[in-house]
Image (spheres, helix red, strand yellow):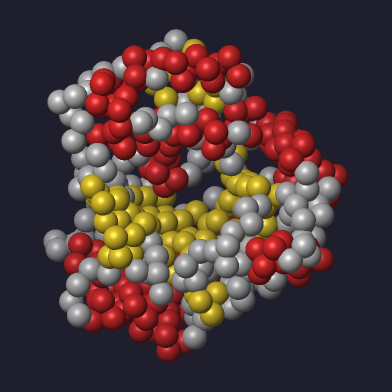
Amino acid sequence: MSVQAVYIHIPFCHEICHYCDFAKMYYHEGIADSYLDSLNKEISMYIKEEPVSVRTIYIGGGTPTSLNESQLEKLFQTISNYFNVEEVEEFTIEANPGEFHEGHVKLMAQYGINRVSLGVQVLDNDYLKEMNRIHTVDDVERSVKLLQQYGLTNISMDFIYALPSQTLEHFETTLKKALSFDLPHYSSYALQIEPKTVFYMRYQNGKLSKPKEEVEAQMFHSLVELMEEQGLQHYEVSNFSKPGYESKHNLTYWDNVPYYAFGAGAHGYLNGERYVNLRPVNHYEDQIKQGSKPVLHSEEVTLKEQVEEELFLGLRRKSGVSDDQFQERYGFSFFNLYENEIDYLVNKGWIKKQGDTISMTRDGMLFGNDVFASFLISDDVWVQKFPIDSHS
């Protein structure tokens, strides 16, 4: 299967958000220059005959727009050297409102960016400050107008809900403000309090609390209803779009197909192996200087793991998982393998069966981790079902 997607990680931020546990560090011009050189060398270790054709490219972070204009152009030139950008269907960059300027946007348009993911998080200046975001609500409006001025109209807004002390009414206010922009795509995730973050330390010290579970559930239901009222399709657990504006890149992940990943802390999937790069930028660069791929860990994905991932990644999509397509890929039916689990989840009201397809219900999406865990297969059961392939 040819590789059709590329993820590139830019780990720099001008400020570190209090909830973020991604691979990131404070922006430093010299370190960023050196990092971009290393990124170029890493890509050259994978792409021997350049440029190659892919369907999607996604530049994430960190904050790609933390780079200055000359650095951003250098990044775009590197990408153009290795990939046929003019053939890419979807070329996305993540951006922080208020952080990029007209020069950044001109470069985006010049080098083929056709989708921008704006990290808005919440439309309330007090909450933005508490989260250590550097933009304001006014910055969001200015940034959207600037992008649209240069023809970059395929914009997605990202939001977080279940913030500390947030009420349902407050979240709905943010949603209604966001929907007033009439953008083609929105993403919204419940806050996860991750270790080694400021929010985690405050939570451990009793200085921060999340809304109750029932309030978080109400927020999710309200999210779905308000989005659908505006004609946005709920095509994945956390994602909504106008028809035809689904994130093609993210669908690559949920379709469980191979993709390149470059940069510090990036996760990729190639040749039947999942790999993760070294996370600290200095370690990442040191490995590249030694002439080696900066991989911290790689592991072959066994047949059992492929099957498990096919189910819990595919179930993130509203369309669910088709048994016919599953059989085309694996040669057997998931209904035979998961008969008891599927019956249990249907009876719980968390998934539904329609013809050859299973998909999560809205209630099931609230308990997604429990649903996904149901499709983890014990080694004993796997050996009983597939004794010949038990070591594949």
Quarter of the picture containing the N terminus is top left
Left or right, 119 with reference to 280? right
Residue 241, x across and y down, in percent: 58, 39
Q: Quadrant of residue 79?
A: bottom left
- Taking depth in this image into account, of 179 and 325 the one nearest to the observer is 325
Residue 35, x across and y down, in percent: 37, 79
Left or right, 233 with reference to 307? right
Residue 32, x across and y down, in percent: 42, 81
User: Residue at position x 67%, y 67% from top?
Assistant: 201
Q: Quadrant of residue 375?
A: top left
- Taking depth in this image into account, of 99 and 259 the one nearest to the observer is 259
Q: Is residue 37 above or below residue 251?
A: below
Q: Residue furthest bottom?
A: 30
Left or right, 203 with reference to 72? right
- Taking depth in this image into account, of 128 and 182 the one nearest to the observer is 128
Q: Is residue 386 above or below residue 195?
A: above
Q: Quadrant of residue 251?
A: top left
User: Residue at position x 37%, y 36% from top?
Assistant: 309
